[in-house]
């Protein structure tokens, strides 16, 4: 399978797992518990499984090193989102959280991963 | 068992009723980030691509959709859960790293996914337990004034006035209606009647209704809405009575009756989804605002029978 095919497969699998975890989140209550599924490793599971088959164990190991930094950034983004959504409502509040994720992830990449 | 079955079936119904567009948006975000992670991995190396595996891809779409459907409080509750899920994701990645070289990557990823679920659930329930031990701070519901705007607009357009009778919502509905720009043209005022004798004396709820049906009942909600109309000389009366956080009279927390009395009759909504005190109050206030729009817009006509067990009922005052 060519690189384009692998990318398409990653996209389909990642999108499908995101939908599956979203549906699980919709089924569960209370809302704060269901929110766990908003930060589920759906894309990670799909992408890592495909990376395993296509590029091997070393590539998975490298990806997961990056993912640790991404997940730490995600914790920071979600903590900020609690307050930013309250202040600015969901669309702008969650965009502020994405800004925090980008800054934290870039910082960790430069300091620890490069 | 019947209640549990009903709860599961109502959740499955809600799932089936989810707009396809919502799911398509989430699929699109998930697919786009997955492809982006692959492209970054090819261009800058797997570590850089791996960063994107924890990108908050669906957070903006999910929070915006939740806020539009259930309000800001629900979106904030969701993101509190996302903090726990994100901590679980750190553990997920560490477990994959720890298992590298010991078992094959594919089983390691599946084991890590199971560990993510267990860790997140433990962190969540641990947090709930800790909040209980430390005494969790209670907040009033975060309902935007903008959510009262449609009701105020409908009243203004119809040339009607409104008064509110509140029990468990404690004045939140009145606070919202008086915060809308131009409130003085449509809002007469409100009465917070929390105790049963206050419901009798201030709103004229018949003692036999309170005795027979209880303070948390359709009949009491109706009497409160009709009573506040008369007492305050308003065209439309809204009422809220229910159990916000604790069971009482053998009734469960989250059971709330909301009524709206207008020129065309009375509509009553029964809420029974217990989502915690703050969210329950918010749900009740939103239901009252929705019913207000309905009684203002409706003309006196034969009653429409709603689906069994759900939605508002209509009767003559």
Image (spheres, coloured by chain):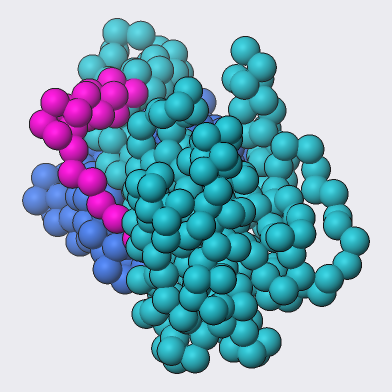
Chain colours: A blue, B cyan
Q: Nearer the viewer, residue B137 or B69?
A: B137
Residue that appears at 61% across and 27% down: B7
Horizontal arrangement in the rendering, residue B40 relative to residue B16 (left or right): left
Q: Nearer the viewer, residue A46 or B266?
A: B266
Horizontal arrangement in the rendering, residue B112 relative to residue A25 (left or right): left
Q: Is residue B95 depicted above or below B43 in this figure?
A: above
Q: Position of residue B50 (x, y in %)?
A: 33, 42
Horizontal arrangement in the rendering, residue B199 relative to residue B50 (left or right): right
| Number of marks present in the image shown | 0
Q: Residue furthest right?
A: B302
Residue B205 showing in the rendered view? yes
Q: Nearer the viewer, residue A40 or B163?
A: B163
Q: Position of residue B74 (x, y in %)?
A: 42, 51
Residue that appears at 18% across and 44% down: B137
Q: Position of residue A65 (x, y in %)?
A: 24, 35
Q: Quadrant of the N terminus of chain A?
A: top right
Q: Nearer the viewer, residue B223 or B16?
A: B223
Q: Residue furthest top?
A: B102
Q: Is residue B267 depicted above or below B179 in this figure?
A: above
Q: Which residues are magenta?
A: B121-144
Horizontal arrangement in the rendering, residue B295 relative to residue A56 (left or right): right
Residue that appears at 60% across and 73% down: B236
- The answer to if B139 sits in the magenta stretch is yes
Residue that appears at 42% across and 82% down: B180
- The answer to if B13 sits in the magenta stretch is no
Residue A64 showing in the rendered view? no
Q: Position of residue B134 (x, y in %)?
A: 11, 31
């Amino acid at each position: 399978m060519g690189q384009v095919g692998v990318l398409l497969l990653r996209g389909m699998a990642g999108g499908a797992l995101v939908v599956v975890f979203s549906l699980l989140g919709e089924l569960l209550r209370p809302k704060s518990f269901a929110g766990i599924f908003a930060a589920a490793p759906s894309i990670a599971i799909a992408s890592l499984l495909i990376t395993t088959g296509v590029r091997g164990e070393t590539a998975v190991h490298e990806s997961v090193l990056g993912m640790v930094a991404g997940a730490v950034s995600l914790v920071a983004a979600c903590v900020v989102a609690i307050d930013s959504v309250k202040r600015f409502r969901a669309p702008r509040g969650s965009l502020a959280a994405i800004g925090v994720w980008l800054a934290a992830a870039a910082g960790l990449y430069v300091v620890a991963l490069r | 068992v019947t209640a549990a079955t009903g709860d599961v079936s109502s959740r499955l119904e809600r799932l089936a009723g989810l707009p396809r567009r919502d799911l398509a948006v989430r699929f699109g975000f998930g697919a786009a980030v997955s492809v982006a992670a692959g492209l970054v991995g090819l261009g800058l190396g797997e570590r850089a691509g791996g960063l994107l595996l924890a990108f908050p891809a669906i957070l903006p779409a999910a929070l915006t959709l939740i806020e539009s459907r259930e309000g800001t409080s629900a979106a904030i509750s969701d993101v509190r859960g996302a903090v726990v899920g994100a901590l679980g994701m750190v553990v997920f990645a560490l477990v994959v790293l720890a298992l590298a070289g010991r078992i094959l990557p594919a089983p390691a990823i599946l084991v890590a996914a199971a560990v993510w679920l267990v860790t997140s659930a433990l962190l969540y329930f641990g947090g709930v337990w800790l909040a209980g031990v430390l005494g969790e701070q209670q907040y009033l519901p975060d309902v935007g004034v903008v959510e009262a705007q449609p009701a105020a607009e409908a009243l203004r357009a119809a040339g009607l006035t409104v008064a509110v009778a509140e029990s468990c919502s404690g004045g939140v509905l009145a606070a919202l209606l008086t915060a809308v720009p131009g409130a003085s043209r449509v809002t007469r005022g409100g009465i917070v009647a929390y105790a049963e004798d206050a419901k009798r004396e201030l709103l004229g709820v018949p003692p036999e209704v309170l005795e027979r049906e209880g303070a948390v009942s359709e009949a009491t909600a109706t009497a409160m809405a009709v009573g506040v109309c008369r007492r305050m000389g308003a065209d439309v009366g809204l009422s809220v009575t229910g159990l916000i956080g604790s069971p009482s009279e053998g009734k469960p927390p989250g059971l709330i009756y909301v009524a709206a009395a207008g020129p065309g009759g009375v509509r009553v909504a029964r809420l029974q989804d217990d989502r915690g005190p703050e969210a329950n109050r918010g749900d009740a206030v939103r239901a009252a605002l929705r019913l207000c729009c309905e009684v203002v817009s409706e003309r006196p006509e034969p009653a429409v029978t709603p689906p069994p067990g759900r939605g508002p009922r209509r009767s003559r005052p």
